[in-house]
Image: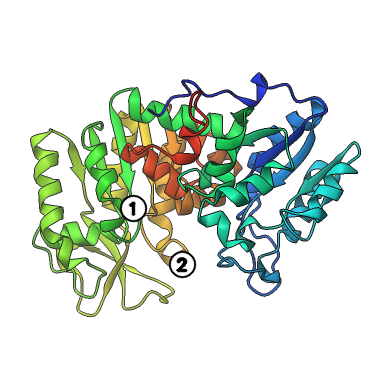
Amino acid sequence: MTTLAGIKTIKDLELENKRVFIRVDFNVPQDKKTRAITDDARIRAALPTIQYAMDKGAKVILASHLGRPKGKVDPIYSLEPCAARLAELLSCEVLLPDDCVGDAPKKLIGEMRGRQIVLLENVRFHPEEEKNDEGFARQLAELCDVYVNDAFGCSHRAHASVHALPKLMREKACGFLLEAEIAKLGKIITDPDKPYLAILGGAKVSDKIAVVENLLNLVDMLVIGGAMANTFLKAQGNDTKASLVEDDKLALARTIMEKARDMKVDLIVPVDVVVAPSTDATEGKVVDVGAIPDGNLALDIGPKTIAMIEGACKKAKSIFWNGPMGMFENKAFSAGTFAVAKAMASVRAFTVVGGGDSASAVRKAGPEIQMAFTHISTGGGASLELVEGRKLPGIEILRSGNA
């Protein structure tokens, strides 16, 4: 089930004078040296829910993780930069206790005044968070009266602040961001307008086997790009030379191609690629897939393949995209990924981007491109698991009767 059935939204809750615990996803990318936030999209995405709770007179308590501190306090992973950025965005005071449980947050929450928010320190400083520990969840429950999940990017994890805590709470709901994620991703899984096109990229076929198999039952057209396309190209008999290939997945690639043919799904794989001798190259060369030079790697899709994808986008009424078409971090190999963003933005289809690098590429393509999409997901792994047809623990626990 991927609909909102049985799930309250924040608008269904009484918030005035209540201590409202909002699980947000402030796991933002940072500069490794300065710790400056390099992309605040996840913080901005949570603002409508936070602002709504404040406007309704709630005492707002936010919780998030940042990075992988492995259950230990590590200043590198402190949420201090997120607190500072949130204070700027909302023009209010954001208080950051030195822990997420215990006396320090209790004291700050008890003394909260208007236009103040408490952002708890990184929940992953405690190993119990990732263990979904009920005792740790009870400590978090002492801080609040109401629970709201607005962290879609973490909802595929059965962690304490996402699963064990709402299990203890009588009053629980989803925030506006999570509501939009469930509704928009739910539509492309349960009720997509046809023709339906899915575009998958990224490095490995093995990461997306379940997604591909589920999508074959839903889509009319399927594009395979990125490094994972190399495995399909080799399975077709092409010599991919130095390109990244999962040799142990060649049989699987052939099976997927046969399934697509049997199910009358138009499977689009690259016919030309941009190659170079290394991933550090400053320029590439366009060649047909059967003519990759010795010692070269395929690092992006070529113009003929881009034209095929643009044509598919024009036919589609629903489009789902997850995964870059090449090594788009290097400008020399970014054309294919940005071309997909522009192609999707130029049509009137129901367009959803499944988080991660694809969402980053859409934002980098510019505000006009970004605004043209129906939905840009904030959770790469979570959106993929939803598209696979899996139930996400952080969503399911919000349904009535699940406590």
Specify few, some or many for label 1: CA neighbours under 10 Å numbering under 14, 14-19, or 20 or more. many
In the image, is 332 to the left or to the right of 15? left
Position of residue 90 measured from the top left corner of the image (x, y, whole percent):
80, 42
Please tell me which residue is depicted at 86% across the width and 49% down the height of the picture.
107
Q: Name the residue under label 1.
A: 201
Please determine whether, in this image, residue 212 is positioned above or below residue 69: above
Between 47 and 281, the one nearer to me in the picture = 47
Please determine whether, in this image, residue 211 is positioned above or below residue 270: above
- Kindly report the distance in space between the C-alpha atoms of the residues bearing marks 2 and 1: 16 Å
Q: Which of marks 2 and 1 is nearer the N terminus?
A: 1
Position of residue 108 measured from the top left corner of the image (x, y, whole percent):
85, 49
Please tell me which residue is depicted at 50% across the width and 47% down the height of the picture.
359
Between 358 and 398, the one nearer to me in the picture = 398
Number of the label disc, if any, that sits on residue 225 = none
Please tell me which residue is depicted at 40% across the width and 26% down the height of the picture.
187
In the image, is 113 to the left or to the right of 219? right
Position of residue 250 measured from the top left corner of the image (x, y, whole percent):
13, 60
Three-letter code, disc 1: Gly
Please tell me which residue is depicted at 72% across the width and 53% down the height of the picture.
101
The reply to whether residue 25 is in sight is: no
The reply to whether residue 74 is in sight is: yes
Three-letter code, disc 2: Asn
For the residue labelled by badge 2, is the local secondary structure a helix, a strand or a loop? loop
Residue at the limit of the structure toward the front, as seen here: 135
Closer mark to the observer between disc 2 and disc 1: 1
Q: In which quarter of the image is residue 21?
A: top right
In the image, is 237 to the left or to the right of 194? left
Q: Name the residue under label 2.
A: 330
Q: Quadrant of residue 230?
A: bottom left
